[in-house]
Image (tube, grey):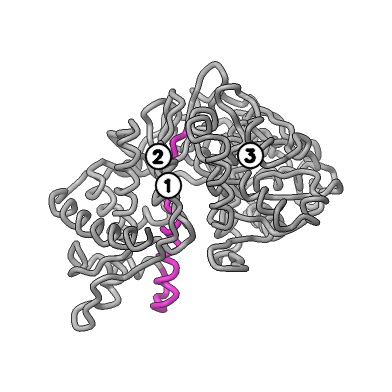
Amino acid sequence: MLLLGIDVGTSSVKVSVVDSQTRKCISSVQFPEAESEIIVPAPGWAEQRPEMWWEQVQQAILKCHASGKYNSTDISAIGIAYQMHGLMLVDKDQNCLRNSIIWCDSRAVEIGNDAFNAIGKEKSLSHMLNSPGNFTASKLSWVKDNEPEVFAKADKAMLPGDFIAMKLTGEITTSVSAMSEGVFWDFVNDAVSKDVMEHFGFSQTLLPKVQDVFSEHGRLSPEVAELLGLSAGISVTYKSGDQPNNALSLNVLKPGEVAATAGTSGVIYGVSDKLIYDQDSRINSFAHVNYSSNEKRIGVLLCINGVGILNKWVKALSGAPDYKRMNEEAVAIKPGSDGLRVLPFGNGAERMLNNKIVGAHFKNIDLNIHSQAHVFRASQEGIAFAFRYGLDIMRKNGMSPQIIRAGKANMFLSKVFCQSFVNACNTPVELFENDGSVGAAIGAGIGAGAFGIDEVFAHMSAAKRIEPKQHELYEELYQDWKTELNKELTSRH
């Protein structure tokens, strides 16, 4: 039995095929090779075309088939991971009504703040574990207020993974995990929040059917099966946001376990068995993939919007041929980058900074000292320090990891970033040969009953472990960086 995993990211779509017996990846591809466009209609806004995702999913699946490493008709289940918090709207004929308002879009911040005050801070936090903030429900309210003709035509509002499953099967479902990441879910009552729906004036019919993450979310239609060289009727048995999915792929399922990613955005994601929340909603709590009403598993998420996107911007501006060259040049510069400091917050409102739009900043540039290599290193150190800033917030809320697990991908491929991250956080990191699309395939296997969630990772082992070094030096560098950040935050009061 083969399992197909699809990971719909901001930059590209990744697809993997995994053997259910060995749990080994047979083939894995990415499409496109270049990073996908983010549409910016106004400052602080961010959108992508849902049909672009669907086109990329099709091309990625066909590209994976072209490897010739497996028989595509042996694929028996499909899993989907996707960029979180986006808003998708379709009419009754399942036609897209507008571009998706994606995770890093900031237009709905004030709408969410108003809802937070109207519902009540304590009730919002104790029931939804979050402020409505800049999440999917608030984005939907923005459409209702500003594009009433679009809202009037909307039959279903969903998240990006729900949309891809709809394109594959013609059916629209969602999950508790997805509803919670949109801040539609009431954890006390284990139901869609009446407070959120009534405050925003949403009809319950606008939301898809809610079911388990690991369950049948529709069967592949004959037309799509023929198009993609797959067997008609195979099931989509798993859908998850990219961060819960990444945690699943790293075997981060039990209370106290913590995962990290450093792609376009950066995330630290820990698991708790308590309904915990931050009083200022700077970190966010959602239902994890193994959440149930009987056994609470809450994913506590720190998100930094400006991570890999800063590295991408620096690469484009410098004309560096690839990230490998940037990392090699950065290694030659000593820690601290000779005083150059970078604040990486140039991708919309940052939740951990109370939804302020701080922007990216390069501080203390000395034209006689600082080279291109200094910029490469300082950017990666700035990202590592941003992680440390967020981790301190998580620690104040009871999440104190003894070790952090991460996939050997994206910025964790950089020696400078890895060591800066570990040193600044003073926490070891274990790197694994994992991938979001492989995690989605594993999720599909769990949903299809090919194996249990407890047995999947029995023989999983880290590819590399990185221990903290020079923590005192990095603590000094971090405090210096934090001083620069505080200056910017103070100037925005």
Q: Distance between the residues labelled 2 and 1?
A: 8 Å
Q: What numbered label is drawn on residue 267?
A: 1
Residue to which mark 2 is pinned: 259
Q: Quadrant of residue 155?
A: top right
Dot 3 lies on which element?
Answer: strand
Residue found 72% across the figure and 51% down from its top: 144
Name the residue furthest bottom. Answer: 368
Label 3, residues with CA under 10 Å away: few <14, some 14-19, many ≥20: many
Tell me the mark number nearer the camera, choosing from 2 and 1.
Answer: 1
Dot 2 lies on which element?
Answer: strand
Q: Is-magenta flag for residue 304?
A: yes
> Marks 1 and 2: in contact by CB < 8 Å?
yes
Residue range in magenta is 299-322
* Observer-nearest of 153 and 449: 153
Can I make out residue 360 in this image? yes
Query: Residue 164, image x and y in percent?
Result: 70, 47
Q: Distance between the residues labelled 3 and 2?
A: 20 Å
Q: What numbered label is drawn on residue 67?
A: none
Query: Residue 212, image x and y in percent?
Result: 64, 27
Can I make out residue 15 in this image? no
Q: Please, what is the three-letter code of the amino acid marked with disc 2?
A: Ala
Q: Is-magenta flag for residue 371?
A: no
Residue to which mark 3 is pinned: 79
N-terminal-most mark, 2 or 1:
2
Q: On the rendered structure, is 374 left or right of 411?
A: left
Q: On the rendered structure, is 377 left or right of 171?
A: left
